[in-house]
Amino acid sequence: MRGGDARTEALFSYVSCEARVPRDHSLRVIRSIVNEALAALSPEFEQLYAKSGRPSIPPEKLLRALLLQAFYSVRSERQLMEQLDYNLLFRWFVGLSLDAAVWDVTVFTKNRERLIEGDIAAQFMAAVLNQERVKALLSDEHFSVDGTLIEAWASMKSFRPKDGSGEPPASGRNGERDFHGEKRSNETHASTTDPDARLYRKGPGQPAKLAYLGHVLMENRHALVVDSRLTQATGRAEREAALAMVAALPGNHRITLGADKAYDVAGFISDLRQHNVTPHVAQNTIRRRSAIDGRTTRHPGYAVSGRVRKRIEEVFGWGKAVAGLRQTRHRGLARVGWMFTLTATAYNLVRLPKLVGAVA
């Protein structure tokens, strides 16, 4: 019998968001890990908010919403608020009931700024990694490091001389700007909309862009991110960030560090050995003599690290992992770095359901 095409609406709903989410959904495991980490951060949240006044957006709900933005590559916070209004899965994960009002996007953005000033993203990543079920998955001996180019949300037309000279773009919403014959460098020019961004070219034959450099340190056992940094784009930024992240690792025991050919520099290799680190860096023998010699390559572990490094590059998928960051609009080293760390934490959370065992 054919059913009638009639609208079935009811005044009251007796099915909660919790009942509508499948029991085997991966977000259930992620939400339990996130809630445990947020509970550990409660004292930090208390220091960021006044003791009296009008209640703001709970920081726990705000962070859960930002994680959803990274999980599903929501392109803007305005669209995120729209999704929260009608997406029952989003409401359940954030902790909003069916009848709860969604926040105004400007209020949401203002409350996010408070978390950026408190550097909550780095503490949130640490809180996730410090959980016993996650800590058991981490290697404390073998690591890999890599970097990626993060394009700044700034037009090349905004890259103008610091002394105020130079012709401005033509009038209009997207006025033209002629750069022919003009020499531009980071020493003489800066973006008027994002001064922290620098003009950078990833490699020979590649176009120069206003960008930042994101750096991630991963352990080799399950390819989980244990540290992330965002720096200005310079030729030495990758190696300097790698040394800083290695120095921040707990303990003073010998470890191995895998990296690609861009890290095969004599000074960097020497600094790693001074930090009690065995450099499992890919040899760059095309343009210069490699700083990695037989002292390292003769060991079987060097070949193993090379295979693991290639697997990590495939699993991590820089383009997919930072898609949420590249589609959100943020300016300044602090804001972009905060979102980069949060995106790295979101990557860990996406991988964890398959690693921690049965679905909660």
Image (spheres, helix red, strand yellow):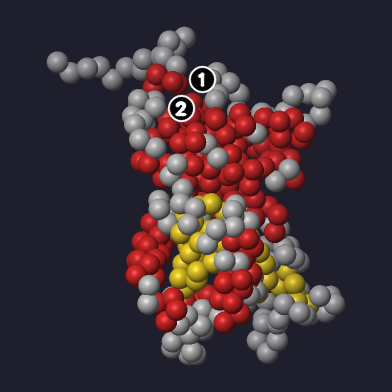
Report which residue position mark 1 lands on: 98
Residue 182, quarter of the rendered image: bottom right
Residue 207 lies, in percent from the top left, at: 55, 78
Q: Quadrant of the N terminus?
A: top left
Relative depth, front residue between 81 and 256: 256
Q: Earlier in the sequence, mark 1 or mark 2?
A: 2
> Is 355 placed left or right of 332 in the picture?
left
Residue type, numbered disc 2: Leu
Q: Are marks 1 and 2 in contact (CB under 8 Å)?
A: yes
Residue type, numbered disc 1: Leu
Report which residue position mark 2 lands on: 88
Relative depth, front residue between 8 and 222: 222
Name the element at disc 1: loop
Q: Residue at x 57, y 66 (%)?
A: 276
Name the element at disc 2: helix
Which residue appears farthest toward the right when viewing the image? 163
> Is 296 placed left or right of 5 in the picture?
right
- The span from disc 1 to disc 2 (Cα, nearest Å) is 8 Å
Residue 155 lies, in percent from the top left, at: 65, 67
Badge 2 local density, few (<14 within 10 Å), some, or many (20+)?
Answer: some
Badge 1 local density, few (<14 within 10 Å), some, or many (20+)?
Answer: some
Q: Quadrant of the C terminus?
A: top left
Q: Is residue 4 above or below residue 177?
A: above
Q: Is residue 166 above or below residue 72?
A: below
